[in-house]
Amino acid sequence: MARISCVEPGRLVLDACAMPVPAPGEALVRIRRVGICGTDYHIVRGTQPYLSYPRVPGHELAGEIVTAGSDGVWKAGDRVCIMPYHSCGTCVACRKGRSNCCTRISVLGVHKDGGLTEYLAVDERYLIAADGLSLDEIAMVEFLSIGRHAVGRADLQADERVLVVGAGPIGMAVAFFAARAGAEVTVLDGNAARVALCVDRLGARHGVALGADTAGELSVLTDGEFYDCVFDATGNAKAIEAGFAYVAHGGRYVLVSIVTADIAFSDPEFHKREMTLLGSRNATHEDFAQVIEVLRAGEFPLDAVVSHTLPFADVPETIGRLMEPGAGVIKALVVL
């Protein structure tokens, strides 16, 4: 069998490896789709803060059971979504039911080798039934779950004004679930085409392309009050810092993206507005289950997001081109 490893920043290799042998409690899964996301691009660039090299990336995974335990829960051919966040179950976060921020979390494709491989042995606790979904849909579950989790962290109320900054796949997921919760959503991004897509297909009410007077335009849209909740999904430290100014008095600011930087903000402004600052990390089993139901119901427009597909063997030579600004990539799927 083969796998793709990022051996150092900027260098991916396709090489042969041994077929994994499942331990007790694990299933052997044939990987069928791998979504490429911002984390994977950060791995290639060398800017992912939680990773050491070499590493097999890949955490947005659709698979099929090859062999599983003898308890009959899984059978060969079952389609599964793989939860990539593996938690300890005993730490302070896990005891609170927040396994997504476990103190000893181990994420496939980040802390340990992930799914850019033909076969993967997976602890059966992290397999989620995905019958009724296409393989492409299953590969969408993880990033959509991150968006749903962020919206849950914000505890949005109907008719609240929401600003989503960053219209990559995670920002699109946030916009979709915020609109689904009844919020009035505005999306801000430097890419006008992505902004338009969020308005046309994902439920956003307004779209703003980043410009010379972004704050002024957002002020006009909100009668000078700005936003009850702002989500950052940019992965850019300067954008995160700018976002504090878009939060209304009494509002919330949810940081979904992760950057390798310290974030600075005006403490007088923060206190004057009695702002709430929230981090949102990963997602939970509940998020995955709810997203799967949304996909089963056909509510999410998959065709609006999946922009590129590529064969497994082409990834080392192609991923650099996918990261180029002019490539027009929203979500790329690797097909195995």
Image: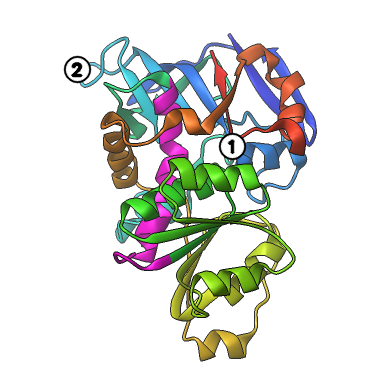
Q: Secondary structure at mark 2?
A: loop
- Residue at the limit of the structure toward the left, as seen here: 72
Q: Residue at the location (66% across, 32% down)?
A: 55
Q: Residues within 10 Å of mark 2 (few under 14, many from 20)?
A: few
Among the 4 quarters of the image, the one containing residue 257: bottom right
Q: Is residue 39 left or right of residue 206?
A: right
Mark found first going from the N terminus, 2 or 1:
1
Q: Report the magenta stretch's main SS.
A: helix
Q: Amino acid at mark 1?
A: Cys
Mark 2, residue position: 72
Relative to residue 131, is residue 159 depicted above or below? below
Q: Amino acid at mark 2?
A: Gly
Q: CA distance from mark 2 to mark 1?
A: 34 Å
Q: Secondary structure at mark 1?
A: loop
Q: Is residue 142 left or right of residue 214?
A: left
Instruction: Please state the extent of the stretch shown in magenta in the rendering.
Output: 136-161
- Residue 272 disc label: none
Mark 1, residue position: 37
How many labels were placed on the picture? 2
Q: Is residue 278 magenta?
A: no
